[in-house]
Amino acid sequence: MLEVVLLRSTLRGRPVCTSFVDNDIPRKLALGAKTTLPWVERRAPRGRRSASLDFQEELQQRQQQQRQQQQRQQQQQRQQQQQQQQHMSQEQQQQQQQQQQRRMYMEANMQSRA
């Protein structure tokens, strides 16, 4: 007797595990069907591990991936901010230098006229 785990997807897109026991499967398989339903994943009888355990593990992996993605995005944002700040300070320095050069030029002009 095989236990069949059926993965149904809900509206939110998360798989919901419902397991049921189909006594007819061995006969269907003997008749030559590869699987009785296209979306059914065949498993060994209970005892090794349950579907809910697998589901929990999958959920944890997804959450971990989401966390890592968020961390990466935050790092990228920080780097962008730092680059913008550096860029700003460089622009400010250039403006200051230009102003100083203008002042020097103006003073030199004034002195040459006097």
Image: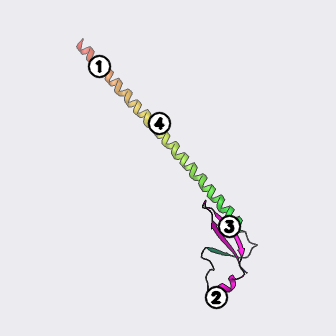
Q: What span is colored magenta in the figure?
A: 2-31
Mark 2 residue element: loop
Residue drawn 35% across the image and 25% down it = 99
Q: Marks 1 and 2, Cα distance to the nearest angstrom?
A: 100 Å
Among numbered discs 2 and 4, the one appearing first in the sequence: 2
Q: Marks 3 and 1, Cα distance to the nearest angstrom?
A: 81 Å
For this orientation, the residue located farthest to the top is 114
Amino acid type, mark 2: Leu
Q: Marks 4 and 3, Cα distance to the nearest angstrom?
A: 50 Å
Which residue is labeled 1 in the image? 106
Q: Are marks 3 and 2 in contact (CB under 8 Å)?
A: no
Q: Position of residue 24 (x, y in %)?
A: 70, 83
Among numbered discs 3 and 2, the one appearing first in the sequence: 3
- Indicate the quadrant where residue 54 lies: bottom right
Mark 1 residue element: helix
Query: Is 17 a magenta residue?
Result: yes
Which residue is labeled 3 in the image? 17
Among numbered discs 4 and 3, the one appearing first in the sequence: 3
| 87 w.r.t. 110: above or below | below
Amino acid type, mark 1: Met
